[in-house]
Image: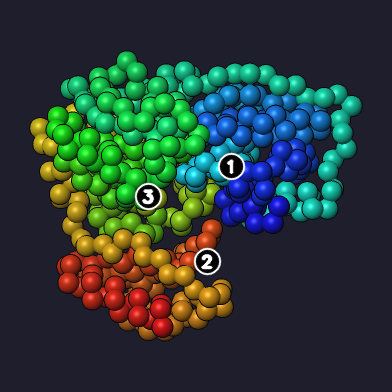
């Protein structure tokens, strides 16, 4: 059991780290912790998701809570169902972009409010370790099957404002994007699919658009010509990566800026969040489009909380998560794709020309360094603060960030791996490379 209770979810290798016995205990501990009565539970296409569901549901039912069995669905659909069905909790059985031998659980309260390590996952782990479960209920909970895919598709199809037919390639990676894409049915979007057969072993490539090599098939297909853009979904379809009509990868923060333009066209003056690793251009584009830009910490639990506190309509994260107020401030890769289709359909320029004005600066990309211990990482952050904090604008929203007139950087520790992560941007390529090497020299000693 050790190590499966993470900062944002519960996740591990099926059969060794994550078993049906543990799933049963998680179900009991979940109800013990929340005192919930009606739990929406969805699952991805992995072959072991079904047996984990059965064990989890048994644990939930034994403590008297009902389960709404959503069946196979994307994570965004499970979030939608949580709210739309009036549930007071939700669980998605998935290991997201991880390889097929992994599985896991994403936990939420009512209205898809996420449960993180700090807001409940650690407590659930303690309940399991101590055996401090609530007593078995006198009346067992029941299981009701409700497929919310069609309702989700109907609801978010409404955001479409597509002025001409759009033609795209969609890489489903044999995963849950197949369900998410049902939202496009009936819209003027022609889809040429890649790897559209559901298969939880992910036989063609890892379902992770953050790894650029997983986009090779998508890029090759788009480069054959005749397409407006391409989209690749991750394993549970709560993230998406995009390429332009030439098959060139669009940075995910630039996608945040593009989608913000579409959202602000119908929500003038709205608050939009971007994560602190994003290009300066994102803030600038939001302002130019009449919105109010606000910076967020990294991580969906933090972003969703800040969105709710500030009544934000949209947020984008450098990892390819796109959050919409309309979906309980949760992710929707379908809405992100439709927003891009809206934008492209209204312009006589190809997508590559549309993003040129936003590609104003030069970014390092996220550079990871493995450090020996948290103590070493703390020393690195202290040294960076000492070296740069006096002359630049320094803040510590997440790790350390320092801004200068013509460059900035953020260095933060990963919440999920023993890594320290650098993101840096400058107004010229030469300065970006020089400052990148300078900061890395401090990080790596």
Q: Position of residue 291 (x, y in %)?
A: 30, 45
Residue where numbered disc 2 is placed:
418
**Contact (CB < 8 A) between labels 2 and 1?**
no
Name the residue at 55% across, 19% down.
Answer: 147
Q: Position of residue 350 (x, y in %)?
A: 13, 37
Q: Quadrant of residue 423?
A: bottom left
Q: Nearer the viewer, residue 346 or 369?
A: 369
Badge 1: residue crowd in 10 Å (few <14, some 14–19, many ≥20): many
Badge 2 or badge 1: first in the primary sequence: 1
Residue where numbered disc 3 is placed:
210
Distance between mark 2 and mark 1 Cα atoms: 21 Å
Badge 3: residue crowd in 10 Å (few <14, some 14–19, many ≥20): some
Q: Please give left or right for residue 349 compared with residue 213 in the image.
A: left
Badge 1 or badge 3: first in the primary sequence: 1
Residue where numbered disc 1 is placed:
103
Q: Quadrant of residue 89?
A: top right
Q: Position of residue 281 (x, y in %)?
A: 25, 55
Name the residue at 30% across, 44% down.
Answer: 215
Distance between mark 1 and mark 3 Cα atoms: 19 Å
- Counting every numbered tag in the picture gives 3
Q: Nearer the viewer, residue 170 or 319?
A: 170
Residue 47: tell me if it is visible.
yes
Element carrying mark 3:
loop
Q: Is residue 384 placed above or below 241 in the rendered structure? A: below
């Amino acid at each position: 059991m050790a190590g499966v209770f993470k900062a944002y979810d519960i996740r591990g290798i099926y059969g060794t780290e994550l078993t049906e016995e543990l799933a049963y205990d998680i179900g009991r501990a979940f109800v013990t912790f929340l005192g919930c009565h009606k739990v929406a539970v969805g699952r991805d296409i992995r072959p072991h998701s079904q047996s984990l569901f059965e064990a989890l549901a048994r644990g939930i039912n034994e403590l008297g809570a009902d389960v709404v069995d959503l069946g196979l669905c994307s994570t965004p659909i499970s979030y939608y169902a949580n709210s739309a069905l009036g549930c007071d909790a939700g669980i998605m059985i998935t290991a997201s972009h991880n390889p097929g031998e992994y599985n896991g659980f994403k936990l939420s309260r009512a209205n898809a409010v996420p449960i993180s390590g700090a807001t409940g996952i650690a407590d659930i782990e303690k309940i399991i370790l101590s055996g401090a479960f609530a007593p078995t209920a006198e009346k067992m909970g029941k299981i009701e099957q409700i497929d919310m895919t069609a309702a989700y598709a109907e609801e978010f199809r409404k955001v479409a404002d597509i002025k001409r037919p759009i033609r795209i390639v969609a890489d489903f990676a044999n995963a849950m994007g197949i369900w998410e894409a049902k939202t496009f049915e009936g819209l003027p979007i022609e889809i040429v699919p890649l790897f559209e057969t559901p298969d939880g072993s992910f036989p063609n490539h890892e379902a992770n658009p953050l790894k650029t090599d997983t986009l090779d098939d998508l890029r090759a297909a788009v480069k054959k010509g005749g397409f407006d853009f391409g989209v690749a979904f991750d394993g549970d379809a709560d993230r998406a990566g995009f390429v332009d009509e030439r098959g060139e990868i669009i940075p995910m923060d630039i996608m945040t800026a593009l989608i913000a333009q579409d959202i602000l066209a119908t929500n003038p003056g709205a608050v939009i969040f971007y994560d602190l690793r994003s290009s300066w251009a994102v803030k600038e584009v939001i302002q130019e489009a009449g919105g109010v830009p606000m910076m967020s910490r990294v991580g969906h639990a933090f972003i969703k909380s800040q969105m709710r506190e500030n009544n934000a309509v949209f947020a984008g994260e450098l990892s390819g998560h796109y959050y919409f107020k309309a979906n309980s401030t949760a992710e929707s890769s379908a809405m992100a794709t439709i927003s891009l289709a809206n934008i492209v359909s209204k312009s006589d320029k190809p997508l590559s020309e549309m993003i040129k004005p936003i590609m104003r600066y030069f970014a390092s990309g996220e550079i990871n360094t493995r450090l020996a211990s948290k103590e070493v990482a703390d020393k690195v952050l202290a040294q960076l603060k000492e070296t740069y904090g006096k002359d630049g604008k320094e803040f510590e929203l997440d790790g350390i960030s320092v801004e200068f007139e013509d460059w900035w950087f953020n260095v933060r520790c990963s919440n999920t791996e023993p890594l320290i992560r650098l993101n840096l941007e400058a107004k010229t390529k030469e300065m970006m490379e020089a400052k990148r090497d300078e900061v890395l020299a401090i990080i790596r000693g």
